Amino acid sequence: MIDLNNPAAFKDLDPKNVFGSTGMLFDQVEQIWKDAKTLSFPASYKDFDNIILCGMGGSAYSGYIIQSLFKNSLKIPLISNNDYDLPAFATKKSLIILSSYSGSTEESLACANQALEKGLTVTGITNGGKLAEFFKENSLPFLQFAAKNNPSGQPRLGTGYMAIGTIALLTKFNLLSVTDGEINKVVSELRQNRQNIQNKAVELSQKFVGYFPLIMSCGFLNGNAHVLRNQFNETSKTFAAFEDIPELNHHLMEGFKYPKDLKIKVLFLDSQFYNEKYKKRIALTEDVVSQNGIESEHLTPFGTTELSQSLSTLSFGGYITFYLGILYNEDPSLIPWVDYFKEKLAK
């Protein structure tokens, strides 16, 4: 078995340095928060009824995270729009956020043109590409970053840029209240715990070899469960799924019986910030899972705030799925079937 604690042992499997990008999450957070400080918006960018975040894949992660993490503080709805078309309820009181790391995502670009035709309030976040050109040609304010802390060049490894960048935008519009001190704490705790995160990720990745990960979460970490599912898919090249508590307790309890050779292993995302009802449900859910002959593991993110734990979970997800991909002898940067699909679709 490859020695996951020795980067030299898997260097040949990681020519694009996905490992390096995974370890730069806190640098991305620090950079994008600072970059956003320079932004200013017209006086018309206010008094919104809803937020529509248009993004796909890794560029949609921020929507899932914000919906869960700030459920109790975001006063207007945020909708993740993963499609070519804006929803019918989009009006001039909607804030359209176009999110595309590469700037070339066709679904997001289609929404950009629709928003422009309807005269809607538009902003966004991107590294460049056609989306950056769209903003510049139409004199629209947006957040552009230089991806200096993502040496792999893979959009899904730029989660710090996309997640914190979107949070920074919403803070600019007074839709969220996140302070410099809170971000500094996140960066400090990520740096402080990086080795501990890597060590735990090595341990967990080895336990999921040969199994389909089923991620279970509660409350503010539900968005992270969605992201982690995607990371297992793309980076580890493995099937995975996610379910949230308490919803799963109303149906999934009966879904473990067939087929008899179900190769599932559950990963519970834990937190001391969960309320007592969540904690009790996790314990009972694990009991049901165990009685159905299914093994489970627990992941408790580091951090002294919910925001810090959410980013810690992002870091854990990056490392766990990287190491699992390496254990499967896969280059974690490659996404051949996604590339094949896009190539065929473009013809």
Image (cartoon, rainbow, N blue to C red):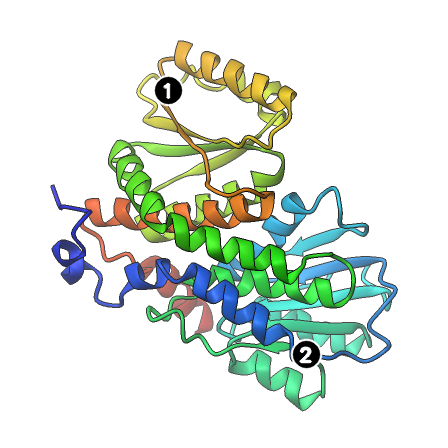
Q: Residue at x 44, y 52 (%)?
A: 190
Q: Secondary structure at mark 1?
A: loop
Badge 2 amino acid: Leu
Q: Residue 144's x, y, as percent? A: 57, 78
Work out which quarter of the rendered image holds the N terminus and state it.
top left
In this rendering, would 197 be left or right of 100? left
Q: Quadrant of residue 333?
A: bottom left
Nearest the viewer among 146 and 137 is 146
Q: Is residue 237 visible?
A: no
Which residue position holds label 2?
39
As drawn, 121 above or below 282: below
Q: CA distance from mark 2 to mark 1?
A: 54 Å
As drawn, 257 above or below 52: above
As drawn, 313 above or below 12: above
Q: Farthest residue toward the bottom?
A: 137
Nearest the viewer among 258 and 44 is 44
Badge 1 amino acid: Pro
Which residue position holds label 1?
259
Q: Quadrant of residue 324?
A: top left
In this rendering, would 329 be left or right of 42? left
Nearest the viewer among 279 and 109 is 279
Q: Secondary structure at mark 2?
A: loop
Q: Residue 114's x, y, as percent? A: 73, 73
Q: Which mark is residue 29?
A: none
Q: Is residue 25 visible?
A: yes
Q: Nearer the viewer, mark 2 or mark 1?
A: 2
Q: Residue at x 76, y 78 (%)?
A: 41
Q: Farthest residue toward the top?
A: 291
Nearest the viewer among 26 and 315 is 26
Q: Quadrant of residue 149?
A: bottom left
Q: Residue at x 86, y 65 (%)?
A: 93
Q: Residue 40's x, y, as percent? A: 73, 79
